Amino acid sequence: MSQYLVELYSPNASWQALPVEQRKQFLNGIQAAMGSLSSLGVEILALSETEVDIDQTSGHRYLGIWRFPDVQARDVLLAGINASGWYGYFDHVNAASSAGSFTSHMAALADV
């Protein structure tokens, strides 16, 4: 069953304190590591700046939405993000789930 991950993140003071050249080096390393993930079936659905003019906006500046064939592939990405030092440079929130339907979601909400 497909798995999904939604990331919300904003650069923090540590990122902003890095010289531009160090930022580029860090991001080049991230980009190089991403190449091997496609062989695991990892799909990027969206990587973008967030819309700020919507109701109940999170306040995070960027959004990532990913699809994975299984939990193991998702966990490989999450381990790589952690190992890269990403969380030290960005205020970051993750949410993960499997695929679901509207009907099953409404039933789960009713049962809470």
Image (spheres, rainbow, N blue to C red):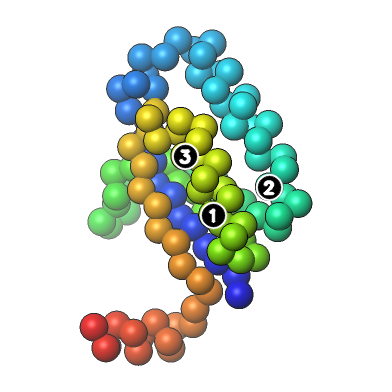
Q: Quadrant of the N terminus?
A: bottom right
Q: Could you tell whether 99 is left or right of 112 in the image?
A: right
Q: Is residue 110 visible?
A: yes
Identify the residue shown where x is 72% and y is 40%: 35
Amino acid beneath label 1: Asp
Residue 40 percent across, percent down from the top left: 71, 55
2 vs 3, front mark: 3
Q: Could you tell whether 22 is left or right of 57 in the image?
A: right
Q: CA distance from mark 2 to mark 3?
A: 15 Å
Reading the image, the residue beneath label 1 is 75
Question: Is 55 in front, or is 20?
Answer: 20
Looking at the image, residue 27 lies above or below residue 102: above
N-terminal of the pair, mark 2 or mark 1, is 2
Q: Secondary structure at mark 1?
A: helix
Looking at the image, residue 56 lies above or below residue 79: below
Identify the residue shown where x is 68% and y is 47%: 37
Question: Is 26 in front, or is 48?
Answer: 26
Labelled pair 2, 3 in contact (Cβ < 8 Å)? no
Q: Which mark is residue 82?
A: 3
Residue 45 percent across, percent down from the top left: 59, 55
Looking at the image, residue 22 lies above or below residue 48: above
Q: Residues within 10 Å of mark 1 (few under 14, many from 20)?
A: few
Q: Secondary structure at mark 2?
A: helix
Amino acid beneath label 2: Leu
Q: Residues within 10 Å of mark 2 (few under 14, many from 20)?
A: some
Reading the image, the residue beneath label 2 is 37
N-terminal of the pair, mark 2 or mark 3, is 2
N-terminal of the pair, mark 1 or mark 3, is 1
Question: Is 65 in front, or is 81?
Answer: 81
Residue 3 percent across, percent down from the top left: 55, 66
Q: CA distance from mark 2 to mark 1?
A: 11 Å
Q: Secondary structure at mark 3?
A: helix
